Structure formats: structure tokens, C-alpha cells
Image (cartoon, coloured by chain):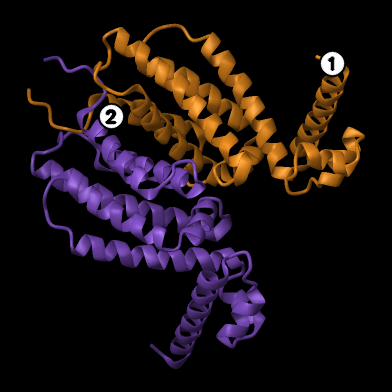
Chain colours: A purple, B orange
């Protein structure tokens, strides 16, 4: 890394630290871009070059938190059943959202409604998460637990849909607690595994 | 209905007409509450009494559109298979969102993130929609198409989760078109019907 790249990296760290500290202490709405620039000891224009909107900084920070939580969850996942593996991963994800519930609410609300370049980034990030879930599905197929003819990405999308609706209703306050969300996730997962159709037997 | 109730009803209609006309022509962001009050020929304070926030009026209007579309879809639904019945209903819902895509985007984004009294209303509205889907599931159980031991509301929630994730990714621009969303919905529904597990046979 040359000197210029190192300096850029250092500025980014300062913005991240300032943003996270202000967002978590004051909340997203009450934090101005001016106060972030001041706390990071940079010019407002410099902050704008890195993050043209306050919400792009929040999305960047939340994605960082989630990526770290997921990396750890995948690294500590013992091979067992599909249900246990998925519960392990999505519980880690949920704990991450629960730590900063108010910020998570803003994040989930904004993530899929960004435009332009940020939208492509969000889509790529969601796709990457789906691929990691699809890997869990593939492994269960190799173990003979799941039907081998199922498209892993289709199954992953379904699992993610269940998680996402639970997450939105929990963050939005429609369901009372994260515990209820996790119970519903498990019940839905079991339903998905067995299927709705009346068995021939 | 007494005179006072009739007057209230008339004022509400005027607000609805003014709001819908301005939102659909100018967009949500570009419409001020002042311009709605002017177009409805009422005082700003009167508008505030009916809808304290601009977005509560949008949510009210979009729910009205959706309720009418769903009433019609349920009224014209011929009894056939679960897949066909659900596709009939959710296609009607999707067409309703497609008619005013930009407003739908704001609606979906705001709906589950309202607070206080509006939140209870949103939760009740979503619950009611889930109950109607659960009815379709119950009918399929009575026909012997689905396993009778499945909780209809649990199945309805799963179907709705699939719809919702597709809707959000379509409105957010992550998937290219509504046609792709509908294909994914059908594929997901089939997956849910058969289940992921390897059949014993």
C-alpha cells in the first residue's frame, strides 16, 4: 500500500469510528454529517467524498458489523443438521441486529431502497449472503439430508425470506420480541423442510 | 349517519381525492401537506386532525387501493389448486403495486416502520391479509391437497414472506422486473409445497 492509499485508509477509519460512536450514542436522526466530520477531524467536503449521504455511512457500518458477525458464525459452525446450522447463522445475525435495534431499524428500512451505485453494492451484498446460505443447503444435500434436485440458491432465498419477514416485523414492532421471531423462524424452517403437501403415505 | 358524521365523511373523501391526485401526479416527496389541504379546500389544521403525517395519508390511500384489489381478487377466485388460487391473489396484489410503483416503494418502506396508533393499525391490516391467505390454505386442506396437521396461519405467513421479499427486492430494484418476481414466487411456492427434505421413497 502506498502512502496515498494508507492515508485514505486512515481517514476512512476515522470516519467509521466517529460515525459509529455518534450513531450509537445519539441515534441516526440526531446525528448531523457536520458533527461526524468534526468528530473525525476532517472537512465536510472530505466526508462527502467518502459518503455522500449520512445513510450510506450507516449502511457501510452496519454491513461491517454484520459481516464480522457472520464470519464468526460460519467459522464456529459445527457440521450437524440443516436446521441447526441455519439457526446458528441466523441467530448470530439476529443478535447483531438486537445489539443496536434502533440503528438496525434504519438500516433494514434503507438498505433495499438505495439508488444508483449504492443499490448495486446492496444487491451484491445480499447476493453474497444468499450464496453463503446456499452453501449450507449444498452441504445438507451432500449429506443426503435434502433432496439433491433442489436448487440451493432457491432454497437459500426461501430461508432468507423467512428471516427477513421476521426481522422486519420484529424491528417494526408488529411481533413483540426477538424470541418470538426466533420461534417463528424455527417453525417456518420445519414447515419448509417437510413441505405443505399431504404425503402419499 | 347523522349530519356531523356525514360532514366528516365528506371531508375525508376530499382529502383522499386531493392526496391521491397529488401523490400520483407529483410524487410523494414533492407533495406538501399544505398543497393537499389547499386542493381539498380545507384548513391545514383540519388535515392534521385526519392525518397528522403525510405518510399516514399515503398509507391510508394505498391500503384502500390494495383492499379493493384484494376484495375483487377474492370475489373472482375460482376454486382450483392452492398454487393457482395463491397466484391469482398475489398477482392482483402485485398489479396494484405496479400501477403506482414509486408510491408503492414509499408505502412498503414506511408501512412496517410506523409508530404508536398507526403501528397497531398496520399490524391489524397485515394480520387480516394473513388470515385471508390462511383461508385459502384451510380450503386446500379440506380438499385433501395439503396436510391437515399444518397450521394455516403458519403456512400463510410463509407464503406472505415469499411474496414480501420478492416485493421488496423488486421495488428496491435488486431484481429487474415484476415478471422475474412472479416467476420466483411460483418457484418458491412449489418448493414450499413439496418441501426440501429428501423423500423416503
Residue B191 shown left or right of residue A99 in the figure = left
Residue at 40% of width from left, 53% of height from top?
Answer: A126
Res. B10 in view? yes
Among the 4 quarters of the image, the one containing residue A39: bottom right
- Please tell me which residue lies in front, B190 or A103: A103
Res. B176 in view? no
Q: Position of residue A43 (x, y in %)?
A: 64, 85
- Asked if disc 1 and disc 2 are in contact, CB closer than 8 Å, the reply is no
Structural distance between the alpha carbons of marks 1 and 2: 54 Å
Q: Say few, some or many: other residues with alpha carbon within 10 Å of mark 2 (under 14 / 14 to 19 / 20 or more).
A: many
Q: Position of residue A67 (x, y in %)?
A: 35, 64
Residue B61 shown left or right of residue B130 in the figure = right
Mark nearer the N terminus (1 vs 2)? 1
Identify the residue position indicated by label 1 in the image: B2
Q: Is residue B114 above or below residue A41?
A: above
Q: Point out which mark residue B20 bears.
A: none
Q: Which callout, 1 or 2, points to the residue nearer the camera?
A: 1
Identify the residue position indicated by label 2 in the image: B191
Q: Chain of mark 1?
A: B
- Please tell me which residue lies in front, B152 or B49: B49
Q: Position of residue A95 (x, y in %)?
A: 34, 58
Residue at 10% of width from left, 44% of height from top?
Answer: A142
Amino acid at each position: 500500500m502506498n502512502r496515498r492509499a494508507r492515508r485514505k485508509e486512515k481517514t476512512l477509519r476515522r470516519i467509521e469510528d466517529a460515525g459509529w460512536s455518534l450513531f450509537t450514542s445519539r441515534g441516526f436522526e440526531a446525528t448531523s454529517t457536520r458533527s461526524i466530520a468534526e468528530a473525525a477531524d476532517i472537512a465536510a467536503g472530505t466526508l462527502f467524498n467518502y459518503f455522500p449521504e449520512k445513510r450510506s455511512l450507516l449502511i457501510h457500518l452496519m454491513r461491517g458489523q454484520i459481516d464480522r458477525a457472520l464470519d464468526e458464525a460460519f467459522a464456529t459452525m459445527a457440521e450437524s443438521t440443516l436446521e441447526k446450522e441455519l439457526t446458528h447463522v441466523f441467530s448470530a445475525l439476529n443478535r447483531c441486529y438486537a445489539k443496536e435495534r434502533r440503528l438496525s431499524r434504519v438500516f433494514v428500512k434503507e438498505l433495499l431502497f438505495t439508488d444508483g451505485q449504492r443499490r448495486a453494492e446492496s444487491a451484491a451484498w445480499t447476493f453474497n449472503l444468499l450464496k453463503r446460505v446456499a452453501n449450507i443447503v449444498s452441504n445438507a444435500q451432500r449429506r443426503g439430508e435434502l433432496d439433491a434436485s433442489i436448487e440451493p440458491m432457491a432454497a437459500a432465498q426461501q430461508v432468507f425470506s423467512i428471516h427477513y419477514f421476521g426481522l422486519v416485523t420484529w424491528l417494526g414492532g408488529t411481533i413483540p420480541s426477538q424470541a418470538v421471531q426466533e420461534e417463528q423462524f424455527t417453525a417456518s424452517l420445519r414447515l419448509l423442510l417437510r413441505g405443505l403437501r399431504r404425503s402419499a403415505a
